[in-house]
């Protein structure tokens, strides 16, 4: 386990907790004090300012979640591996600090998504528009998410990703088919190509504006 493989911006004391927790998890030590769930709880309870938002980035495996975050962070996408746990990216947009939690989308990982719902301000759901064979599965998973009490009322940004592929479903069709699932809440379906960096900033701009409006309405 190389320290350089774990990249997160956090206080030194927290970094030690994270490192030791991961170390003990890897080696199944009986000295484990902070289990994985405890680690997540600690990270979620870090103090946030009023201009800071916690955003979940979810979707089926191979939808392009990590590629989108890397593009938004101006990072190389030459080498991307399937997310087995979670990644955290922080970025600033229109005065908001966005803490983006990218969670693995494999079927075996999805039951653990609910461990990340606490204190979520918005959901980014990534759809592989070219994977029409799994579109119903994608829709079903989204329906489960928005039905959760902890996800009630939060805005949802749908990235209809991979629009650069000829086999992709147009964003308008994606929106039409997801309309009933998302009825009664703020949502936006954004045509996107993570590979070509198209539609990403526009989608994020909508999300930040929507959160800003919600913030003003509650004052």
Image (cartoon, rainbow, N blue to C red):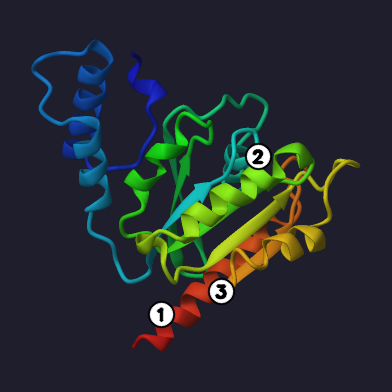
Residues marked 1 and 2 touching at CB (< 8 Å): no
In the rendered view, does 57 fall on the left or right side of 10? right
Q: What residue lies at 83% left-to-right and 45% top-to-bottom?
A: 168
**Could you say where residue 165 lies in the image, as x and y percent from the top left?**
86, 41
Q: Name the residue under label 1.
A: 215
Q: SS of the residue at dot 2?
A: loop
In the rendered view, does 96 fall on the left or right side of 47? right
**Could you say where residue 202 lies in the image, as x and y percent from the top left?**
68, 64
In the rendered view, does 62 fall on the left or right side of 119? right
Q: In which quarter of the image is residue 61?
A: top right
Q: Which residue lies furthest to the right in this view?
A: 166
> Cα distance, mark 3 to mark 2?
22 Å
> Cα distance, mark 1 to mark 2?
30 Å
Residue 94 shows up from this direction? yes
Q: Name the residue under label 2.
A: 63
Quick one: label 3, few (<14), some, or many (20+) residues within 10 Å?
some
Q: Name the residue under label 3.
A: 186
Depth-wise, is mark 3 or mark 1 nearer the camera? 3
Name the N-terminal-most of marks 3 and 1: 3
Depth-wise, is mark 1 or mark 2 nearer the camera? 2
Quick one: label 2, few (<14), some, or many (20+) residues within 10 Å?
many
Q: What residue lies at 60% left-to-right and 69% top-to-bottom?
A: 187
């Amino acid at each position: 386990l190389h320290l350089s493989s774990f990249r997160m911006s956090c206080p030194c004391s927290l970094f030690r907790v994270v490192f030791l927790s991961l170390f003990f998890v890897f080696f199944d030590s009986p000295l484990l004090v902070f289990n994985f769930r405890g680690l997540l709880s600690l990270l979620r309870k870090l103090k946030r300012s009023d201009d800071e938002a916690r955003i979940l980035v979810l979707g089926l495996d191979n939808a392009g979640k990590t590629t989108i975050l890397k593009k938004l962070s101006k990072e190389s996408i030459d080498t991307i591996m399937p997310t087995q746990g979670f990644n955290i990216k922080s970025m600033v947009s229109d005065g908001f600090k966005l803490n983006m939690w990218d969670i693995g989308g494999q079927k075996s990982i999805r039951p653990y998504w609910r461990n990340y719902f606490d204190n979520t301000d918005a959901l980014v759901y990534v759809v592989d528009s070219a994977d029409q064979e799994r579109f119903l599965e994608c829709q079903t998973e989204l329906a489960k998410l928005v039905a959760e009490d902890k996800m009630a009322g939060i805005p949802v940004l749908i990235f209809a990703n991979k629009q650069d592929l000829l086999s992709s479903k147009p964003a308008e069709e994606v929106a039409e088919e997801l309309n009933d699932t998302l009825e009664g809440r703020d949502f936006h379906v954004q045509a996107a190509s993570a590979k070509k960096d198209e539609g990403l900033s526009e989608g994020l701009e909508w999300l930040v504006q929507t959160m800003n409006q919600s913030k003003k309405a509650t004052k």
